[in-house]
Image (spheres, rainbow, N blue to C red):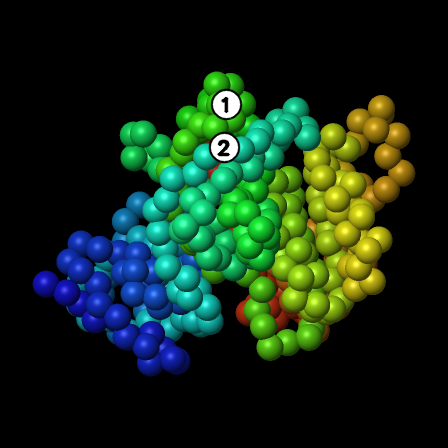
Amino acid sequence: MTFTVTVQPSGHTFTVERDEAVLPAAIRQGVGLPYGCKDGACGSCKSRLLDGRVIHGAHQLKALSPAEEEAGFVLTCCATPQTDLVIESREVVGAGQFPIKKMPCRVSSIDKPAPDVAVLKLQLPANDRLQYHAGQYVEFILRDGSRRSYSMANAPHTQEAQPGIELHIRHMPGGKFTDHVFGAMKEKEILRMEGPFGSFFLRDGTDKPMVLLASGTGFAPIKALIEHLEYKGITRPAVLYWGCRSRADLYLHDWAQAAADRLPWLTYVPVLSEPKAEDAWSGRTGFVHQAVMADLPDLSGHEVYACGAPVMVESAQRDFVERCGLPAEAFYADSFTSEADKH
């Protein structure tokens, strides 16, 4: 028993197995629906149901409220069709471009540039390249079958010299995976992963200026985007706003500063929400998305790429659209939902 899903306005169709949600079927068949967490927590995959019936699995009310459901919106990551469907969703060109594969990887180095951040470098099989867009993520498959998602912090072209990826991992005390990274993990350890996933990557075909907005380790995919822009010779004006609590949390501050010094089209604005006395911080303070609004009260001609804590992403999306005139479709985000956020 399968159902057919038609996506408007593109007219693309794909099939969904019985008891399968819409999004995994789309990913499997290379149809580029937008998504982030795949777990009913972030709301990135919200689409309008034009025809048909679905049953929703468990999800967070902030991702899809009862009023939105009543108005005909669905979360494709946890909506299981009961009939053929027609949904309205802007498709992401290139989202299904690269094959999703499972592969082993070997830990080649673990650095801790901040007390609670690890930069993990992983060596990939030489004969089996991982192709991805800068901004996408991989999932580690843990022994018990559970998964943890992390964005690549290096651009795809860096694979050419030596197949490997860089990930930035924040320690969540009590976290099944991060306790291991910050505890027993050793170099040469083998991990299993699958990817690439996600619809957070650079949109081509425009030269609009960009705001690159990161909080905490949300800097990882933004770093990959900057490397990609430099490699491709794309010179669209971009301002990187990186929000952290204290100076120590700006764990690659020197990298960001050096990139801005080197690239005439890039400006770097670090923002601390709770600088410590010993930081002797003379830079910007407060919430990072409010720093953007203070500098750029009119975002109507911009694109925003935002990545980090769900509360930052949600506040930025709401305030930029409502108060700064940003077109809703010009806000691209990857909300870093932890396991705790999903329950």
Point 75% across, 44% down: residue: 255
Using residue 254 as the reference point, say whether residue 315 is left or right of it. left
Front residue (pair 20, 29): 29
Residue under numbered circle 2: 107
User: Where in the figure is residue 265, as x and y percent of width and height?
Assistant: 79, 64
Q: In this view, does 182 lie above or below 337?
A: above
Point 68% across, 28% down: residue: 114
Using residue 236 as the reference point, say whether residue 17 is left or right of it. left
Label 2 environment density (alpha carbons within 10 Å; few <14, some 14–19, many ≥20): some
Point 14% across, 65% down: residue: 2
Using residue 200 as the reference point, say whether residue 129 is left or right of it. left
Mark 2 and mark 1 residues within 8 Å of each other at the beta carbon:
yes
Using residue 76 as the reference point, say whether residue 241 is left or right of it. right
Mark sitting on residue 194: none
Q: In which quarter of the image is residue 190?
A: top left
What is the quadrant of the C terminus in the image? top left
Residue under numbered circle 1: 186
**Which secondary structure, mark 2?**
strand
Q: In this view, does 160 lie above or below 324?
A: above
Front residue (pair 180, 111): 111
User: Where in the figure is residue 216, as x and y percent of width and height?
Assistant: 64, 40
